[in-house]
């Protein structure tokens, strides 16, 4: 199997980066400048649009392809849903992302730890929202820590959880740990 | 005779499986009929017309996760009933009526579900593979069965006294237990072997509606199957079932331990001494009487007398014996429960999933606080950037 390149994205990354005003990072960083969003995620995004401003409709974005899952992919989505639990439609978006990535050899962009654990079981490569910011630090911001830290601050303002109080403290920690690319 | 079944589950969790929409349709139709609903009624409940349900049951409709989740909810069934792979050997067992193992659909379903869950936790490394003795095989004489029971007790450092918490003891050698509600007249239990990439585990489901002594005997019987590695042996004969039963009773009530308890009550009547043995080793009356005869503590005449004088609960109370109820439904092995809760705390399992896995033994409010993502979790976001 070849190294996966294209991205299939979950609700969390899309909505947080949109709300933070940095959706352009997705387009700039995604391989080919396009991300795939399964229809189940699109439904969740539409629900999110009712609750928060600043989230554009997927249909209005040129760099998004909405994917309708095949029967094989839906079956995998359901198998993952069993492992994610719940009687309702919760987690169906994440399950669709993993199923799509598994069958189409894509990278899954997901933040939820339980979903990442499932992706690992299915042999799916994952990235998360912060990974995109770190990639932007390297590829778009000319390794300018202040710019990257501001993006993190904007994400924290959308209630995205990180174990750091600010972008500055995150990047200072990463620098001290020798993690910065 | 115990009414049990056994088998193996070796399909990998994430194997690509061909979607069999026909089989799915059959399962949906069976579940709908079991729920007493018409196609029209089900369609109305989930916002579809009758023809959509007909086409779904005929395997002709494009699959939709939202629809199937909704249908499972309306039918009061877990989603896994429709999409999980059945345990192959149990299916074989059920269809092979010539074998001594007579099982029921309810037991098969519980075994399917519990085996799938154990396999998932094994693949997630939340459960570790069992360390089953490599040289164990089904004994062919009662002496060999007794010796095997002694060896296993010695390996586990159990001495020869009464055992409590069998679920904890058996999980040390890789057998995980679920005590389910299978009805008072239902099957006693079953056992399957599950394989993951990291190793194998045993899975036993027992009938939690059976009397306490029978539950313990059934679970120990399944433990015997697991130890002997014949959970997958379709050639298991009536004779080997008797040998596994022999192992089970010698494991629960070893000759020397039984004699010790018998000797502790020299002034009591024979029947009261047998009651003492039963209460100590938590055996059913028939098992006590049988084992006292097996180890030559009583003769046949006494065996006949005691067999015809079943005790009542008050007999134990009169003598001051207490009986700790064990394997009362719902029950899961403590190691299985710990794996589930640890999976939740570490964020690998959702709270919804953990509650399902724990099968009513813990409520959502009982779950401990989930650990928040740590610096180590963040570390992964700095990897894979090509430098």
Image: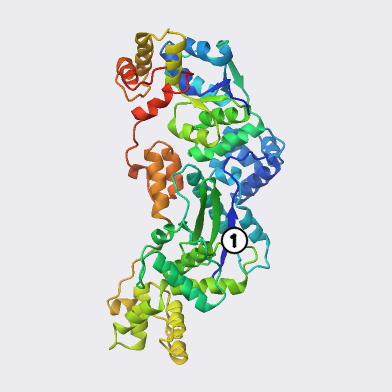
Looking at the picture, tell me which residue is in the foreground, B33 or A76: A76
Does the image show residue A76? yes
Which residue lies at the image location 62% right of the left edge and 62% below the top edge? B233
Whether B137 is drawn above or below A90: the answer is below
Q: Colour scheme in the image?
A: rainbow
The chain holding disc 1 is B
Q: Is residue B256 left or right of residue A119?
A: left
Residue B17: image location, x then y, percent: 65, 40
| Disc 1 packing (10 Å; few <14; some 14–19; many ≥20) | some
Which residue lies at the image location 55% right of the left edge and 33% below the top edge? A123
* Residue B343 placement: quadrant: top left
User: Secondary structure beneath disc 1?
Assistant: loop
Whether B240 is drawn above or below B304: the answer is above
Q: Is residue B290 left or right of residue A65?
A: left
Where is mark 1, residue-wise? B104
Residue A54: image location, x then y, percent: 44, 12
Does the image show residue A53? no
Residue B61: image location, x then y, percent: 69, 34
Q: Is residue B366 left or right of residue A44?
A: left
Q: Quadrant of the N terminus of chain B?
A: bottom right
Whether A86 is drawn above or below B279: the answer is above
Q: Is residue B34 left or right of residue B166?
A: right
């Amino acid at each position: 199997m070849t190294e996966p390149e294209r991205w299939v994205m979950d609700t969390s990354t899309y909505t947080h980066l949109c709300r933070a005003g940095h959706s352009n990072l997705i387009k700039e960083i995604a391989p080919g400048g396009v991300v795939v969003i399964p229809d189940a995620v699109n439904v969740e995004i539409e629900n999110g649009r009712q609750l928060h401003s600043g989230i554009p409709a997927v249909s209005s974005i040129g760099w998004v392809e909405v994917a309708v899952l095949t029967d094989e992919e839906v079956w995998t989505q359901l198998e993952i849903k069993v492992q994610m639990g719940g009687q309702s439609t919760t987690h169906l978006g994440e399950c669709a992302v993993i199923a799509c990535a598994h069958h189409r050899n894509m990278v899954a962009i997901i933040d939820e730890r339980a979903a990442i654990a499932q992706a690992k079981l299915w042999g799916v490569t994952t990235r998360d929202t912060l990974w995109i910011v770190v990639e932007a630090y390297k590829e778009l911001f000319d390794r300018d820590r202040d710019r990257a830290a501001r993006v993190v601050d904007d994400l924290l303002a959308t209630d995205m959880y990180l174990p750091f109080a600010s972008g500055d403290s995150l990047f200072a920690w990463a620098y001290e740990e020798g993690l910065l690319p | 005779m115990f009414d049990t079944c056994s088998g193996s589950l070796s399909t990998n969790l994430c194997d690509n499986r061909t979607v069999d929409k026909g089989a799915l349709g059959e399962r949906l139709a069976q579940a709908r009929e079991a729920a007493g609903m018409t196609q029209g009624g089900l369609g109305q409940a989930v916002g579809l017309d009758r023809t959509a349900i007909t086409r779904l049951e005929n395997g002709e409709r494009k699959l939709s996760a939202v629809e199937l989740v909704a249908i499972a909810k309306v039918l009061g069934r877990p989603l896994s009933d429709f999409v999980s792979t059945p345990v192959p050997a149990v299916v074989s067992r059920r269809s092979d009526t010539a074998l001594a193992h007579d099982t029921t659909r309810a037991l098969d379903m519980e075994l399917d579900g519990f085996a799938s869950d154990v396999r998932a936790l094994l693949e997630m490394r939340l459960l570790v593979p069992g360390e089953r003795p490599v040289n164990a095989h089904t004994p062919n004489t009662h002496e060999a069965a007794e010796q095997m029971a002694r060896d296993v007790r010695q390996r586990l450092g159990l001495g020869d006294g009464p055992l409590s918490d069998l679920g904890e003891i058996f999980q040390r050698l890789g057998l995980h237990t679920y005590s389910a509600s299978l009805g008072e007249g239902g099957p006693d239990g079953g056992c399957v072997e599950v394989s993951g990439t990291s190793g194998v585990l045993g899975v036993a489901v027992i009938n939690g509606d059976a009397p306490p002594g029978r539950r313990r005997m059934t679970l120990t019987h399944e433990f015997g199957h697991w130890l002997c590695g014949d959970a997958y042996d379709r050639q298991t004969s009536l004779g080997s079932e008797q040998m596994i039963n022999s192992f089970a009773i010698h494991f629960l009530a070893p000759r020397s331990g039984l004699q010790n308890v018998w000797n502790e009550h020299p002034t009591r009547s024979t029947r009261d001494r047998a009651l003492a043995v039963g209460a100590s080793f938590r055996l059913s009356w028939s098992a006590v009487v049988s084992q006292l005869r097996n180890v030559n503590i009583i003769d046949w005449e006494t065996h006949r007398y005691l067999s015809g004088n079943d005790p009542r609960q008050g007999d134990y109370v009169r003598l001051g014996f207490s009986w700790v109820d064990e394997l009362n439904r719902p029950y899961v092995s403590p190691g299985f429960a710990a794996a589930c809760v640890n999976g939740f705390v570490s964020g690998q399992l959702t709270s919804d999933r953990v509650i399902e896995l724990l099968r009513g033994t813990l409520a959502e409010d009982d779950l401990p606080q989930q650990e928040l993502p740590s610096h180590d979790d963040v570390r992964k976001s700095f990897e894979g950037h090509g430098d």
